[in-house]
Image: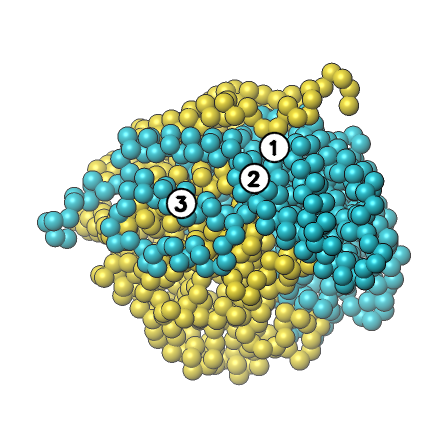
Chain colours: A yellow, B cyan
Amino acid sequence: MSNDEPAPQSLGDLDPAEFRQRLHEAADWIADYREQIGARRISPQEPPGAIIAALPSSAPSAPEPLVAILEDLDRIIVPGLVHWGHPAFFGYFGSTTTAPGILGEMIAAALNVSAMTWRTSPAATELETVVLEWLRKMLHLSDEHRGVVYDTASVATLHALAAAREALGLDIRRSGLAGRTELPRLKVYASDQAHSSIEKAVITLGIGEENVTRVPTDDEFRIIPAALEAEILKDMADGHRPCAVVATVGTTSTTSVDPVEAIAAVCRKHNIWLHVDAAYGGAMALLPEGRWAMAGTDLADSIVVNPHKWLFVPLDFSVLYTRRREMLRAVFALTPEYLRGDASANAENYMDYGIQLGRRFRALKAWMVFRAFGEEGLRLRIREHIRLARLLASWIAADPGFELVAPVTMAVVCFSVRNQQMSLPQVNHTVEVIVQSVNATGEAYLTHTDIRGRTAIRLAIGNVLTTEAHVAACWALVRAVSASAA
Amino acid sequence: MSNDEPAPQSLGDLDPAEFRQRLHEAADWIADYREQIGARRISPQEPPGAIIAALPSSAPSAPEPLVAILEDLDRIIVPGLVHWGHPAFFGYFGSTTTAPGILGEMIAAALNVSAMTWRTSPAATELETVVLEWLRKMLHLSDEHRGVVYDTASVATLHALAAAREALGLDIRRSGLAGRTELPRLKVYASDQAHSSIEKAVITLGIGEENVTRVPTDDEFRIIPAALEAEILKDMADGHRPCAVVATVGTTSTTSVDPVEAIAAVCRKHNIWLHVDAAYGGAMALLPEGRWAMAGTDLADSIVVNPHKWLFVPLDFSVLYTRRREMLRAVFALTPEYLRGDASANAENYMDYGIQLGRRFRALKAWMVFRAFGEEGLRLRIREHIRLARLLASWIAADPGFELVAPVTMAVVCFSVRNQQMSLPQVNHTVEVIVQSVNATGEAYLTHTDIRGRTAIRLAIGNVLTTEAHVAACWALVRAVSASAA
């Protein structure tokens, strides 16, 4: 090294005093952002490429002051975001971040431990176990259900179906699926409303996208158990092997709820793994009046619930519960020498239940949210979101220009325009224009969905900052833009 | 709802003034933690179960004050952690978190956007593209290499091998692998030193664990290209189909470097996908004197590099570059109706390249680290870690009681005791006792590895807070405990 370079020891990290100052500035930044978020435009108007064009095409050679970086954050990045935390953001499954969740994430980032084995961070592993138990009880799952935390429901479902595949007893972990003439085709069943993560999992697992059977649903978008069983019987007659059935509690389009008990009976009869996707709908189990939605899930082999969807934990935090966690181990436990000493028999090593080795300390934020709100606080917020959804549904039902196109089972409302002079393509086009027009105002954010060929406005409530006034203002906006769209 | 309950509107989130106060307390907590981390015990001494026993077995019913929660964090959780950020933590691949990385994570948690499509958050998507380009240039990869950010290298490798599987042209996405009598067995090759994530990926993909061929390595733990080709030829003669070769730049045990150029020639000759695991070693490419380690990686079909390993970004942040990103799309692109409007042809939709749909705003922290340090600052820190590793190696080489058991290629040192009176099992036992004894002091943290039947102390340097004094103190500790262990 040349003599002009600073002594390496002086490089280290940011100067501690400066770091403290920047942390306090970031604290105020977050407090301001969250306090004033309702006054922001929700979504930007720039076309693709604007942010890229505003930034250098290479990393700087020399260090830059954090002050300048944070200025660019405010000037370039933040105006280009869709503000998922805005109380009038009603897209997708909303944003459920909260103050205690943000505090938990910031502390976890500072700790930066990896909970791959118990030994790599005992408290991170044990707090994961504690939080999983707390949530299991809140969901009223049996004490035979043991959990593991993943990042997303797509990954949790992938693991559930990997366990189901191994549970077939076909020696798939060791020998795989290819070039084995004795193996049948494997089949996975889900409703025509189920999430696309099932296809992604089935593709990944080598089962093949065409081996997902989409079972028809009834007029409330619930799987028809007799149709499911008919598909299973047909496949078995054709020499195929059913691998798993996926039931959904709270489908993405309409939050419909499959009849899990009847599906479980079909699965039991034919000895098929039942996985329940309750990524969104699982939160219903916290309400006495919502437990109907999770009825029968206790019978499932595996269940995914996403606290980052409707339990107020920031992205990412997805939980898989299973009665047969040993099957996850049978697929994924594999201890290399450099981790051998860590595989204590008396402790959980969560890396044994999955693909990921590096595991963030995700339990901390969930622990902080569940304590800061308490089960009662979680319940009241979920209940309020349902109340707001039903209130909106009542306004829609009372308006001659609109109609509900799916039952409101949770806190998502799907509706469309009602106009007997318009053809279906015209109606669908009008709905798309309404969604685009509302979003273009920057005052609310909606997404759309397709319900059996009919395009619907889909309005999801899940943000603790959302009040009746936000829902009412969005509804007024929808009516106003629809008047000019029609 | 009863009249005794608070009005739902008042529930919302934490009171803004209180949140601001807690954010500032958390800011000070983080500043204190980071400033004083070197004075902490690194690892706890409690047996498994202590944390679980100290916490309630159910979530509280009523809300709890955040002050009480943060007190429990200090009293129960933090003493039970292994402090990966401690400057004398030399286990695994160290901890590379930094002040700008922590600031980035805390702001990302407050924003809580999901970068699944461009439309769901344009700036998050475009900043991901920008950061990927910056890093690609720093790694000297060709401009044909396009990137995507995942959580971990295990997930990145899973995606790379899924793309390799699809690139075989066997219609695997659609038809899968099972029950297809025309399909051959698929084979994946890696060295006997390569990471266990390869087995996890191969198991997941339905290729089967026994279809991973572990190719022998030379006396510096590098794959022997002739041995690799011999395995490939044998498999082809047996009617199997090579799917991918995984070369490693910086193996987990000894940071050995496979001869990527020679391996690439074998892969090209037989038309096999080459994936390079440079999760740790990729950082070497930033140094002119380190570029030898990444020589030939430009020829690879895919390359994984983990900025959360040795580029000072907090967990999790793993990057996959590939010349054939269209193969990732061919496996994973699948757009459900509720995201159809988002799949703009003019913009990146990163969800199309992977399993995960919910995608945290990970680019922010990397952008802040790369700017705050600059390429020069990254380079100086990496260089300093290599200097410290070589310095330690020189001390070991000069000590009659110890010996190096692998070349020091990067910033990991593997060594053992040298004692001609002891049998190999005795030497191995002594090394395990040394590691345990050092860790029991709480003053340093080491892990061990196995090198062809020989247990070795493995000391990894990668923390920006680590100085020569920390390395010297750890070395003194090793010598002291070994004197009593022998």
Q: What residue type is labelled 2?
A: Gly
Chain-order first, disc 2 or disc 1: 2
Instruction: Indicate the quadrant where residue A451 lies.
Output: bottom left
Tell me the subunit letter for badge 2.
Answer: B
SS at badge 3: helix
Q: In this view, does A354 lie to the left or right of B227?
A: left
Mark closer to the chain start, 1 or 3: 3
Q: For the residues carrying marks 2 and 3, which lies nearer the camera in this image? A: 3
Q: Residue at x 37, y 45 (%)?
A: B72
Reading the image, the residue beneath label 3 is B75
Residue at (74% x, 44% y) in the render: B413
Q: Mark 3 lies on which chain?
A: B
Q: Which amino acid does label 1 sit on?
A: Leu
Neighbour tally class for label 2: few under 14, some 14-19, many 20 plus, Cα within 10 Å: many
- Please state which of residues A447 and A135 is positioned toward the viewer in this rendering: A135
Q: Which residue lies furthest to the right in this view?
A: B226
SS label for mark 1: loop
What is the CA distance from the residue labelled 2 to the residue labelled 1? 8 Å
Residue type at mark 3? Arg
- Would residue A450 be seen by someone viewing this image from the given angle? no
Determine which residue is flagged by label 1. B465
Quadrant location of residue A105? Answer: top left
Q: Quadrant of the C terminus of chain B?
A: bottom right
> Against B175, is B16 above or below?
above
| Callouts 2 and 1 in the same chain | yes
Residue A407 located left or right of residue B366: left
Which residue appears at 64% of the width and 60% of the height? A340
Considering every residue shown, the one lying at the far top of the view is A4
Q: Name the residue under label 2.
A: B85
